[in-house]
Image (cartoon, rainbow, N blue to C red):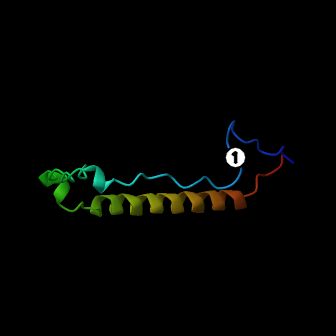
Amino acid sequence: MPPPRRLWPRRQPGRPRAAVIEAVDAAAGEPPAPLVPSPPLPPRERREFDFSDIDQLLDRTDQAIRRAQNVLEERSKCTIPAE
């Protein structure tokens, strides 16, 4: 049985405390920062990705794996004659 796990230095056991989020004080006169819009995506990233080539490669890979499993299964059934 492995020894018990040790805590990191200055780390308390249990779930970490919730993060403290400071609210913006509207009375202080500081308006919240405006949200910056995301830059537009280039045309190449905007179109939907075509997975047909990947699907064909995965099908071929599955076939190769099945063939290899069948060959190994057949070879394991064969007995080597004792000399």
Image-based side of 55 in relation to 7, left or right: left
Residue pushed farthest front? 27
Write down the quadrant of residue 14 in the picture. bottom right
Rendered position, 77 above or below 16:
below
Image-based side of 11 in relation to 37, left or right: right
Identify the residue under disc 1.
Answer: 12
Residue pushed farthest right? 1
Kindly identify the residue that appears in the image at 44 percent across and 57 percent down: 61
Rendered position, 41 above or below 52:
above
Count of all numbered marks drawn on residues in the image: 1
Residue pushed farthest top? 9
Write down the quadrant of residue 47 in the picture. bottom left
x, y (%) of residue 30? 25, 49
Kindly identify the residue that appears in the image at 64 percent across and 56 percent down: 15
x, y (%) of residue 78? 71, 59
Secondary structure under tag 1 reads loop
Image-based side of 82 in relation to 36, left or right: right
Residues 57 and 38: in front is 38
x, y (%) of residue 48? 21, 62
